[in-house]
Image (cartoon, helix red, strand yellow):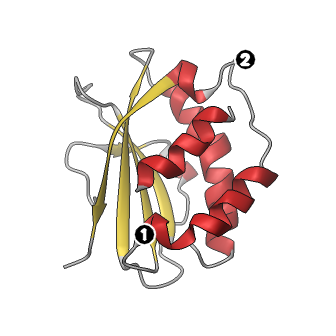
Amino acid sequence: MLLDRRLLLLGSGFIGLAGCATANAGDRHSARPSHETKAIELTFLRSVDPDPERAAQFIKTNWFAMDAVAQSRGLMTFFNLHVDPARNEDWNLAVQVGYPHERGFDSIRTEWAEIVAAHKTVLIDGKRLVELATIVGTRRLLPA
């Protein structure tokens, strides 16, 4: 489950999502999959601050640093961050990750633990993710 993947980070520091804009469009992370995507996992977050900028910065600085390592090893096909401009009550950030296996994150658990262990968490304004946002849900989607 993707929630497990992101919870590892809390301790240490859809295709075309309707109504969402990619955070910092010029700062895209692998908009084109490097391998065939067989599963997409979404993580929905709610920032503590109504402005999700600091939470988004944490995700890009920490999660995406590790995702880039995973992608370079062929464990992920792409990753993106989206912001809900309508300030959805339940969530205002969504992280989208593609995997080359239908089991998504479950297929890379062992390798991911190694990547997390090697990563040094970068705090944003002295704060960890748990102080900037809360994960409110996850979904795994399979391409039709």
Q: Is disc 2 placed on a helix, strand or loop?
A: loop
Alpha-carbon neighbours of circle 1 within 10 Å: few (<14), some, or many (≥20)?
A: many
Q: Is residue 101 above or below residue 132?
A: below
Is 111 or 14 nearer to us in this picture? 111
Please indicate, yes or no, whether residue 78 appears anywhere in the rendered image: yes
Residue 33 in percent (x, y) is at 48, 76
Residue 2 in percent (x, y) is at 43, 54
Q: Is residue 89 above or below residue 84?
A: above
Left or right: residue 71 versus residue 69 is left
Amino acid type shown at disc 2: Gly
Residue 61 in percent (x, y) is at 67, 41
Q: Is residue 11 above or below residue 126?
A: below
Of circles 1 and 2, the one toward us is 1
Give me the C-alpha separation between circle 1 and circle 2.
32 Å
Is 66 or 114 nearer to us in this picture? 114
Q: What residue is at 48 percent from the left and 49 percent from the top?
A: 4
Q: What residue is at 68 percent from the left and 73 percent from the top?
A: 72
Q: Is disc 1 placed on a helix, strand or loop?
A: helix
**Upstream in sequence: badge 1 or badge 2:** 1
Q: What residue is at 36 percent from the left and 79 percent from the top?
A: 38
Which labelled disc corresponds to residue 104? 1
